[in-house]
Image (cartoon, rainbow, N blue to C red):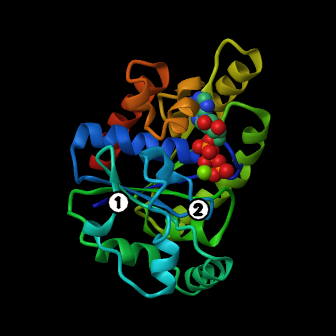
Amino acid sequence: MSIVGVISMKGGVGKTSVTANLAAALAGKLGEGRVTAIDLDPQNGLQWHFGLEAQDSDGVCELSVRSEPWRREDLPSGFNVDCMPYGAGAERDREAFETLLEHEPDWLGAQIKRSGLSKDAVVLIDSPPGVSVYQKQVFACADLILVVVLADAGSYATIPAMETCLDEMEKKYPNLRSAYVLNQVDRSKSLNRDVADLLQRYLGERLVPMGIHADSAVGEALAFHQPVLVYDPHGQASHDLDRLASWVIEALNQ
Ligand SMILES: Nc1ncnc2c1ncn2[C@@H]1O[C@H](COP(=O)(O)OP(=O)(O)OP(=O)(O)O)[C@@H](O)[C@H]1O
Ligand SMILES: [Mg+2]
């Protein structure tokens, strides 16, 4: 089993969009039953990308608070991706869940291992922005971390803190690998182009070679509760995500 965590220091950079659409792209390549997407963000938005918004009661938060195990066969599925929502539970559930995560740093990895996923499953985990109990859980179980950044000054400013964090985590978890994914690339805008070039020079091979273009189809697809690869299969973002999925498969096989 391979676990890919999607994180960022800054909010709104596209983690949830990348997690969902990358999961759909991976499922397109690997087939049904191979890809699971886990929403570890109280915003509980990941499931929307798979048209699963109706099933919003039992998520990872409620199941955990009730000490109920996750079972792969119980997970709702959309577009060949099994999706574990965070859950739309009460505030006290969220607090209890976060306390549990605080006390059991390896809790997420243990649940995933026990869930009955196949040995060749790929699990993607979406997380809230910044350092949190959720992000720590992701670091503790992931094989590969994808850090989503935009080509803007706000994302650029977070890179030193992220690099320090990744250094620490890679010391703590020696098998952990990480790479940056540049999202919303728009080379027609000079600032976007300049920051993208700066990031390329600064990060070198740590920047995944294919960025994801700014493409209005990403937001439109969500409005239609579909992955962008289904909504606009021949569009720019779909093409980029397909290439990113190939890159991830290769990285996980190394
Ligand atoms: N490649 C893209 N092109 C155009 N719009 C995009 C792209 N990626 C993401 N977006 C849009 O950017 C906004 C933020 O995306 P998203 O919710 O995925 O970010 P996030 O990092 O998960 O946010 P949060 O930190 O709140 O969890 C959404 O409106 C989404 O549709
Ligand atoms: Mg998000």
Q: Element type at marker 2?
A: loop
One can see residue 185 in this view: yes
In x, y percent, where is residue 16? Answer: 55, 48
- Quick one: which residue is furthest to the top in this view? 188
Give, as a three-letter code, the residue at label 2: Asp
Q: Residue at x 44, y 40 (%)?
A: 21
Residue position for label 1: 76
In x, y percent, where is residue 213? Answer: 56, 24
- Counting residues from the N terminus, which is met first, the one under dot 1 or under dot 2? 2
Q: Nearer the viewer, residue 155 or 117?
A: 117
**Is disc 2 surrounded by few (<14), some (14 to 19) or many (20+) residues within 10 Å?**
many
With 106 as the anchor, is 97 left or right in this view? right
- Mark 2 vs ligand 2: CB under 8 Å? yes
Q: Residue at x 50, y 33 (%)?
A: 221
Residue position for label 2: 41
Instruction: Assign the N terminus to one quadrant of the image.
Output: bottom left
In x, y percent, where is residue 78? Answer: 34, 48
